[in-house]
Amino acid sequence: MLRHMSYKGWSQLRGEPLDAMWKRVAAEVLLRAHEDLARAGHVKQLPDLTGETWWTVLHDRLTARHEEAETLERALGDFGLSPYPRVILLVEGETELLHTKRLLAEIGFTKPQQVRVQRAKGSKASPHLIARYGVTPRVGRRLGDRWLLDATPTALVVATDAENRWATPEQRERERRALLEAIREEVRSQGADIGHDYLDFLVAVHVWGADSYELANFTDDELVPAIGRLAAGRHDAESSAWQQELRSQLETARAAHDDVKVVLGRMKLGNPKVRLAEELWPLLRTKFEREWTAGEPVTPVVKLIADVRRIYHRISGIRAMVVPDRFDA
């Protein structure tokens, strides 16, 4: 990392670390003098490190211009300081944003460089730009049968309602393949290529099922009390007739695969989805703890978190892309 700093940065060191830096500067001066003399034919060239698979002291030359020098992004990744997330989780709305962030925190994913949750504001939004510029591996130099990665790799997980471009399994797979092809194109524009085995797990698509988020993750028996609390203060909200009407509207919404906001509107509650998310959170946390402890996720959003965790751990160990013998179309 020090080779990427200016004097203004490393001169703030004190004691032995500063002495070591000045010695590295002195060594670099001598090495550059040697290179000048070698170009003039007075001494032998320094060893060529191109393609070497083992470390030598010359790999640590104090200049970012050295061909074998690690990039700043790679150095940051090696020290666990990379600003790039391991997983980008793309969700539709505010409820999903609130719940997934809190569930990820429950398993220790509290830093944006671990999993970054991004709101898409609807299932019609295209994730292609995110795939191209947020997920495409940043390719470094080639070393034998692989390309080193200049930055820690990132995977994309799309979590959405089963509608619009994500309506059917066939549409979802077609969209996923299009995203993968976009990533492949960006890798090739860097002068490299990417094999199917590595490429395939960079993009995953999750839907909640046939229903929208709230209806898929919570039963009517769970939703009725929560929605009822949103209507607290209304003279009719505690009546059995009102609750029966609410159950009828939830049943109708499930049959039509409507969003829960349709139910809230018909019950003249407006669209307090964020408040509803807060009301549902304690219940979701209890379900999550039970299913996570049992190791048997059942609730769709709990299944999502389990898959995000799996992808995170798989991608965290990758530092290079192996060059395949052939490339899949």
Image (spheres, rainbow, N blue to C red):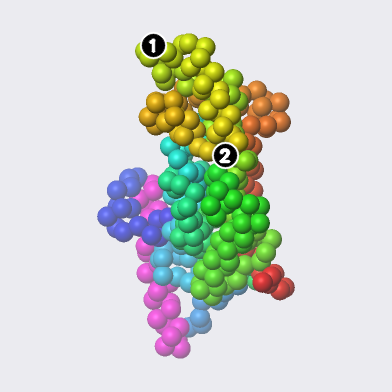
Residue 129 appears in the picture as rendered: yes
Residue count near mark 1 (Cα–Cα under 10 Å), binned few <14, some 14–19, many ≥20: few
Residue 168: x and y, percent? 63, 52
Residue labelled with disc 1: 235
Secondary element type, mark 1: loop
Residue 312: x and y, percent? 59, 45
Res. 64 image quadrant: bottom left
Please determine whether, in this image, residue 125 is positioned above or below residue 161. below
- Residue 23 in magenta? yes
Residue 101 appears in the picture as rendered: no
* Number of marks: 2
Kind of residue at badge 2: His
- Magenta stretch, main secondary structure class: helix
Q: Nearer the viewer, residue 220 or 288?
A: 220
Secondary element type, mark 2: loop
Who's the residue at 48% across and 72% down the image? 67
Who's the residue at 43% across and 58% down the image? 72
Quarter placement of the N terminus: bottom left
- Residue 323 in magenta? no
Residue 115: x and y, percent? 51, 43
Quarter placement of the C terminus: bottom right
Q: Which residues are magenta?
A: 16-42
Residue labelled with disc 2: 257
Who's the residue at 51% across and 14% down the image? 241
Pointer 2 and pointer 1: residues touching (CB < 8 Å)?
A: no
Is residue 307 found left or right of 58 in the rendered image?
Answer: right
Residue 212: x and y, percent? 55, 38
Res. 98 image quadrant: top left
